[in-house]
Image (spheres, rainbow, N blue to C red):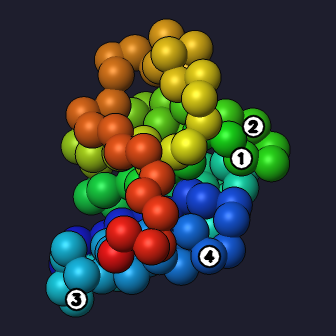
Amino acid sequence: MTAVLVVEDLPAIRAWLVETAQFAFPGAEVVAVARCSEGIEQMGQRAFNVALVDLGLPDGCGVEVIQALRSQQPTAVPVVVTSTTTTSTCFRRCRPAPLATCSRISHATR
């Protein structure tokens, strides 16, 4: 079974990412949290195939989550989903770079 981790602090965006993950991976287990620390904690409890990670989180940068994912679950695919305008700064800290990035898309475009 596919498992997806969603790390996003804004409730509406988090709900939309969960819905999107469920659409993209029918039957997947989707775990959604709002903070870096919660995402890293979840990695200790289960294996994930994909992680959708925001960069600007209340307790740090999502890069911390990606680094932990790479260390703990190297086969998982990190995807950055953010509206942060300083992504180049964050990506310099994230080596190797995530396999995919996605800027947030307005709900109006759905």
Q: Nearer the viewer, residue 102 or 34?
A: 102
Pinpoint residue 29: horizontal percent, then vertical percent: 35, 81
Q: Amino acid at mark 2?
A: Gly
Query: Mark 2 sits on what residue?
Result: 60
In this rendering, the label closer to the viewer, 2 or 4: 4
Mark toward the viewer: 3 or 1: 1
Q: Residue 63: give x, y in percent of width and height.
A: 55, 31
Q: Quick check: 90 above or below 1? A: above
Q: Is residue 79 left or right of residue 63?
A: left
- Proximity of marks 2 and 4: CB atoms separated by less than 8 Å: no
Q: Secondary structure at mark 1?
A: strand
In the picture of the structure, the residue carrying the numbered disc 4 is 12
Marks 2,1: beta carbons within 8 A: yes
Q: Earlier in the sequence, mark 4 or mark 3?
A: 4
Q: Quadrant of the N terminus?
A: bottom left
Neighbours of disc 3 within 10 Å: few (<14), some (14-19), many (20+): few
